[in-house]
Image (cartoon, grey):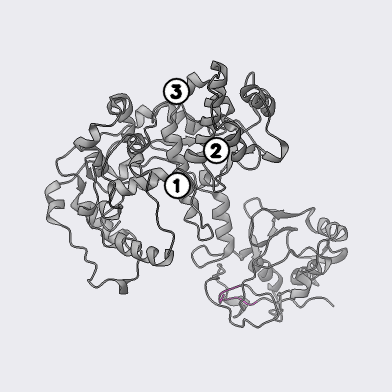
Amino acid sequence: MPFGECTVTLQDVAFQLGLPVDGEAVSGCLGEFETYMEGGRPAWEWFEDLFGERPPPNKVKQMTVHFTWFHERFRVLPPDASEETVRIYARAYIMMLLSTQLFGDKSANRVHIRWLPFVANLDGMGRYSWGSAALAWLYRCMCRVANRNVTNLAGPLQLLQSWIFWRFPSLRPAGFEVSSFPLASRWSAYLPPNDGKEQRVIRYRLALDRLTARDIVLEPYSALDVLAVVHPEILTEEHSRMWRAVTALIYFAVIEWHQVDRVVPQLGGVQHIPEDALNVDWLHAKDGRGGDRWFPHYYQKWHEHWENRLNAVISIERVADPGPSADYLDWWYREAQRFLSLGAAFADPRGTQIPPEAYQRGSSQVPRRSQLPDMPDNRRVERRRRVGTRDTGRDWRWLHDAMQEDDAGGDARAEVDHRVRRANARRGRTPDDTQHAGGVSGFAATEAGGDTFTSRAYSQMPEFTPTMTMDLDDQLVSPRFYADFAELIRDDAGTSNVQFGGQSYQQQMPDVQMETGAYQPQLTEMHSQAHDYQGQYGVDLNVPAGSPLDTWFTMGGHPPVRVRVRPST
């Protein structure tokens, strides 16, 4: 926000949804119960025992059951129902509630069988931290929808909507004045308009950009009308202390981080300059797909952190006027992306003057918290490095060094063209191609989700493991490509042979290993001279191509090196 950070916390979950935030983590496996659970049974046998029947095959999709089957089958409880029938209907209701309200996906019409171990023991469901699991899922869904290609938001949206209405009175609809518990039920009859979405997006962006520190209610739950309706157990120290825990939030394969130390004013304190946020990109890359597993073991360190959650509770000194300190605002004005709208949308200059009340609050101590190492997604880091922007700097040193060795003691070689014609690149892979690929390096592998074609050269020196990357739009696995590439490293003065596409060439550099991936063409030209190269291949894919109508594959940006190999005829 223009005045600082704010977010949904475990306190909001407790008041808005009435869910317990303390207890065991909501985790386990997704369906292979007989494999990972002691005394577990095959999923659909267990389903039949718990619900008295199996759904028809046309209502089943992998490990989910269509919501309509549950709704039609268990919609009305018979008046003469036995105790066991009541328990069956209770299980069905809880399964529908969990799968479509708290942990719903974008389909919003599937009931997952991961909940079978939980509903099998209805009396034990209260020992789990459903609130922290729901918040973890909301965080993950909000992370996903931040991607430009994602348009729909899943998760417990009633929690997010109610949090907005309670925290920002200027954004709430009129006519909903009666509070009830849980607090999110206050807006149960609210129906947002569906017309003019584009105009409403612009209007809400402007409304957010014009918010000031006086437009957010930092402590909405301290009002007397709220305290009069909330469940008294929420206010006990056993549950309220969890609001101040900087800890992991766990929901099966989803691990998120409760960064309440960055929103101290929401708990009645003065906001200090926060420590760097924990990097959990590696955890964000995990979503449970790619095979079932026992997640408490797979994420053992994070489960242990949750088990020790009481050690992660920070101390917050309550003050009469909670809010950001002057030091925090000075840091925030310098570092933050504070506005969504373009500058032209504002009639007034967006000032950065620190208000007097911020100085009056004084400063606050950075609360003690458990230190955990960052968990970056190394695959993403490697992928970004291979893209070759000026920031990451693609490393072509191995190619440069090989050329320098070839040229040592002699005249510089004539300029050659390394680019591959589009017709060659689009050849499909055949068994014969696979044979030729094995002749080069022993394998040619497709990297899942990759965007580049990577050729690695492994030196006999153990510390030398360089990378060459070419952005192409099809897999290059045909013999012609290997012949073209062999042209690049062929030397008349060599002493040993290496096989490329079944042909023998003189080896002048280490064996080359080919990995193929999915390709995105980046049009550019390569200029300058090889001897101008200074050890880094500065390619920026954000720079437009120099000749967009060229029929060749090109690489993006304007690098300082030009190396070419003519395709074999």
On screen, residue 477 versus residue 80, left or right, reads right
Give the x, y percent position of residue 286.
56, 43
N-terminal-most mark, 3 or 2: 3
Residue bearing mark 2: 253
Residue 43 figure quarter = top right
For image coordinates 38% across by 36% down, the residue present is 17
Q: Nearer the viewer, mark 2 or mark 1?
A: 2
Give the x, y percent position of residue 416.
72, 79
Whether residue 478 appears in this view of the structure is yes
Seen as rendered, the residue at the extreme top is: 83
Q: Amino acid at mark 2?
A: Ala
Q: Is residue 444 above or below residue 298?
A: below
For image coordinates 66% across by 70% down, the residue present is 404
Give the x, y percent position of residue 253.
55, 38
Seen as rendered, the residue at the extreme front is: 79
Q: Is residue 49 above or below residue 425?
A: above
Q: Is residue 557 above or below residue 27?
A: below
Residue 287 figure quarter = top right
Q: Nearer the viewer, mark 3 or mark 1?
A: 3
N-terminal-most mark, 3 or 1: 3
Give the x, y percent position of residue 250.
47, 35
Q: Which residues are magenta?
A: 556-562
For image coordinates 62% across by 52% down, the residue present is 463
Q: Local crowd at mark 2 within 10 Å, few (<14), some, or many (≥20)?
A: many
Q: Which mark is residue 279?
A: 1
Image quadrant where one finds the C terminus: bottom right
Residue bearing mark 3: 127
- How many labels were placed on the picture? 3
- SS of the residue under disc 2: loop
